[in-house]
Amino acid sequence: PIDSQPIALSLTMEVGAWTYHYGNKSDYSWELARNFCRLFYTDLVAIQNQGEIVYLNNVLPRHRTYYWIGIRKINNVWTWVGTNKALTKEAENWANREPNNKGKNQDCVEIYIKRDHDAGRWNDENCQKKKRALCYQASCQRSSCSQRGECVETIGNYSCDCYPGFYGPECEHGEGSRTGTLGEGALHPLGEFSYNSTCKFQCQEGFELQGLDTLQCLASGNWTAAAPECAVLATPGRGRLNCTHWHGDFTYNSTCTFSCEMGFVRNGSETLACTALGQWTVRPPLCEAVKCPVLDSPGRGRLNCTHWHGDFTYNSTCAFSCETGFVRNGLETLECTALGQWKGRPPRCEVTRCPKLRDLEPILMNCSHPLESFSYGSVCRFRCTQGYFLNGTSRVQCQPDGHWSDKMPACQGKLFCHVLASMWSSAFPLQWLTQARGTRSTCDTLETNKFIWA
């Protein structure tokens, strides 16, 4: 169990050759659930047979959102992600009327545990739904199959798929001095691995051949030279290589185990062994950066990312900014963690707001709001009711900094009559002006005598 790990606790169940693990605190999307399993165990569980299904349904606790398993639709084919092999018709265990792709994009698979009906069966689901991660930890050891075959996990036991030249339950028996295989690369004119037989050798990608690429069986019963070796070219980037050599560096029975740094997951087999044919059992794995969900620019905003190990992967950082007139609501920078999650939620860009204006008589206000009420770009125009005059600007606009372009004007005093400047000095007595400030009717009368409105 990973109780000591600084993430959700998990529970463990042992089943013969391997153990099951399931998180009991956090629910994850399918991708995050797989990252969780690969980071601390082997992978999301791969269902082998009905016996395993019965066992899981009996032992696992019921959970309201059920459990993710290691099947996903790839190129429209349901595939076991651990082996990258297509799900066969014989191995299908779908619930009634499933898979139905209800709601579309249901490309991942959950298992119903202790459901009232269809218990232990599968359902296709949207990969973004959050469920418990159901993981397994493989238990094949380096010594399994005498390091002469592939260890195949089964429930309660394991079996050995022996490499050419070996046989037995643990591949413990050899077939003499054979150094080649039948088929391409081998020629036996007088019988298998006899006089004049020739064998050609080549290494898989990622390795180099050390020794002769062609051997011939002599009349003495010996080969023209020792079998060549396949040497590991290099440790995978962001990974570590730990090898055990029994007969010399990178020779027969040498085994090499690969692991990856934090924030990277292994894509390929964990352990390779050098066979009697001078070939490694499988290709070397790659260490690939854990991926985080792809981020998009926020509305009215911009996104600027730095990717160290690939787009939106471990240690990628993304900075958010907003257009003029908008402010960020949330974190400025997000970072992709080793668990494939962003350290925080993406922010939003919200329009800048100015203080709300109120129109009280005698002032009259008419505003237009291209975005939101009293926000960036809003324009308000002012005028006064009859009998008052405007003191200040007639138009203000909301600026990007959240302030109005000018102070709100005011409507002041009753309108009064005044004399044209050219007529002040002599045309009318001062008492006329005093009388003109009295009533509207007086102003109307005086207007005919060359008085005007202010």
Image (cartoon, helix red, strand yellow):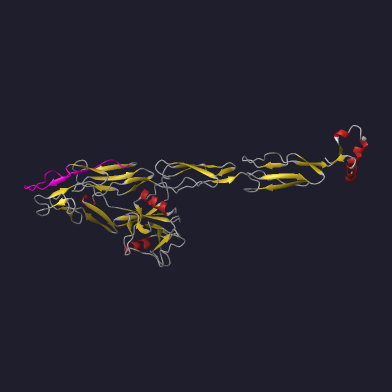
* Residue 330 in view in this figure: no
Q: Is residue 69 above or below residue 346?
A: below
Residue at screen point 27% across, 55% down:
152
Q: Nearer the viewer, residue 246 or 427?
A: 427
Q: Nearer the viewer, residue 452 or 35?
A: 452
Occupied quadrant, residue 431: top right
Q: Main secondary structure of the magenta part?
A: loop
Q: Is residue 137 above or below residue 320?
A: below
Toward the left, the furthest residue is 220
Q: Tell me where residue 198 appears, x and y as whole percent.
A: 13, 49
Q: Is residue 311 magenta?
A: no
Answer left or right for 339 relative to 430.
left
Q: Tell me where residue 9 appears, x and y as whole percent.
A: 41, 51
Q: Is residue 213 magenta?
A: yes
Q: Tell me where residue 209 appears, x and y as whole percent.
A: 21, 43
> Which portion, as a residue range, is magenta?
212-236
* Residue 368 in view in this figure: yes
Q: Tell me where residue 435 appears, x and y as whole percent.
A: 91, 40
Q: Nearer the viewer, residue 109 or 111?
A: 109
- Image quarter hosting the C terminus: top right
Residue at screen point 20% across, 56% down:
169
Answer left or right for 321 relative to 359.
left
